[in-house]
Image (spheres, rainbow, N blue to C red):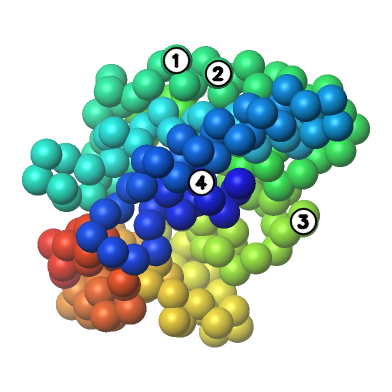
């Protein structure tokens, strides 16, 4: 269900960024699990909370011209407040057990985004701490990359870029388009325009989703 929702939230290839039907089916099935005596566990509620938080902003992720909008660019007034409320309820139910899972931590991170008034006012320090906790449970390269994005908001682009280059040398992320897109954004913030353009162009060559490709092309 986690994989199904993830593919719906950001399609890995094709001409659509979002596949709403996959997200909604993952939520429907997770709701069934939460109503099942055996599967009604804290981690199931944590997964469902994560899905609801992410689902709340599906409609804000692309504009009328099918351009991808970053979290910073999205109109938070259009986020689905009912989804966010459902996410908070399931997150509370997820806190009843003794076990901390990746779903708990990722739902916690998503809750800070969902409830922040703006991108700038988001509690990035707390999000960074949650990524540290996530890496103790699941030290994946993608989680490390996401942590670096949060680090840039706390410590600055230069500190984050140093960590990113260190990660890229030992993680195999050189073949992942979002590694280069992140590198491009950090370089752009530092005013290193030519290097940023080159990074975005490299990300563009490795990307298979048409909407993301349009976004990366505009960045370049």
State the CA–CA distance, disc 1 to disc 3.
32 Å
Q: Residue furthest right?
A: 98
Where is residue 95 drawn, in percent x and y? 78, 25
The mark that comes first in sequence, 1 or 4, is 4
Task: Tell me, for residue 5, which label it has, or none.
Answer: 4
State the CA–CA distance, disc 2 to disc 1.
6 Å
The local secondary structure at tag 3 comes to helix
The mark that comes first in sequence, 3 or 2, is 2
Few, some or many residues within 10 Å of mark 4 (<14, 14–19, 20+): many
Residue drawn at the location 37% of the way across and 40% of the way down: 20
The reply to whether callout 1 and callout 3 are in contact (CB within 8 Å) is: no
Question: Which of the pair 8/99 is nearer the observer?
Answer: 8
The reply to whether callout 4 and callout 3 are in contact (CB within 8 Å) is: no
Where is residue 145 drawn, in percent x and y? 52, 63
Residue drawn at the location 16% of the way across and 50% of the way down: 67
The reply to whether callout 2 and callout 1 are in contact (CB within 8 Å) is: yes
The local secondary structure at tag 4 comes to helix
The mark that comes first in sequence, 4 or 3, is 4
Q: How many marks?
A: 4
What residue would you read off at disc 2?
86
Question: Which of the pair 190/185 is nearer the observer?
Answer: 185
The reply to whether callout 1 and callout 4 are in contact (CB within 8 Å) is: no
Where is residue 204 drawn, in percent x and y? 25, 74
The local secondary structure at tag 2 comes to helix
Look at discs 1 and 4 and give the one toward the viewer: 4
Q: Residue furthest left?
A: 65
State the CA–CA distance, disc 1 to disc 4.
18 Å
Task: Tell me, for residue 82, which label it has, or none.
Answer: 1
What residue would you read off at disc 3?
136
């Amino acid at each position: 269900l986690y994989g199904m929702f993830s593919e719906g939230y950001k399609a890995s290839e094709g001409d659509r960024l979002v596949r709403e039907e996959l997200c909604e089916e993952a939520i429907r099935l997770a709701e069934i699990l939460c109503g099942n005596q055996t599967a009604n566990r804290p981690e199931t509620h944590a997964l469902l909370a994560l899905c609801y938080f992410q689902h709340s902003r599906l409609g804000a992720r692309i504009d009328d011209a099918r351009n991808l909008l970053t979290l910073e660019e999205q109109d938070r007034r259009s986020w689905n407040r009912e989804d966010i409320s459902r996410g908070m309820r399931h997150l509370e139910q997820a806190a009843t057990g003794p076990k901390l899972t990746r779903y708990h931590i990722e739902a916690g991170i998503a809750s800070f985004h969902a409830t922040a008034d703006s991108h700038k006012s988001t509690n990035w320090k707390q999000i960074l701490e949650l990524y540290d906790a996530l890496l103790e449970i699941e030290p994946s390269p993608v989680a490390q990359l996401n942590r670096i994005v949060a680090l840039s908001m706390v410590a600055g682009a230069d500190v984050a870029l140093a960590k990113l280059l260190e990660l890229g040398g030992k993680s195999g992320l050189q073949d992942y388009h979002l590694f280069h897109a992140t590198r491009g954004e950090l370089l752009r913030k530092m005013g290193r325009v030519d290097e940023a353009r080159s990074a975005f162009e490299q990300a563009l060559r490795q990307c298979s989703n048409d909407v993301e490709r349009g976004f990366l092309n505009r960045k370049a």
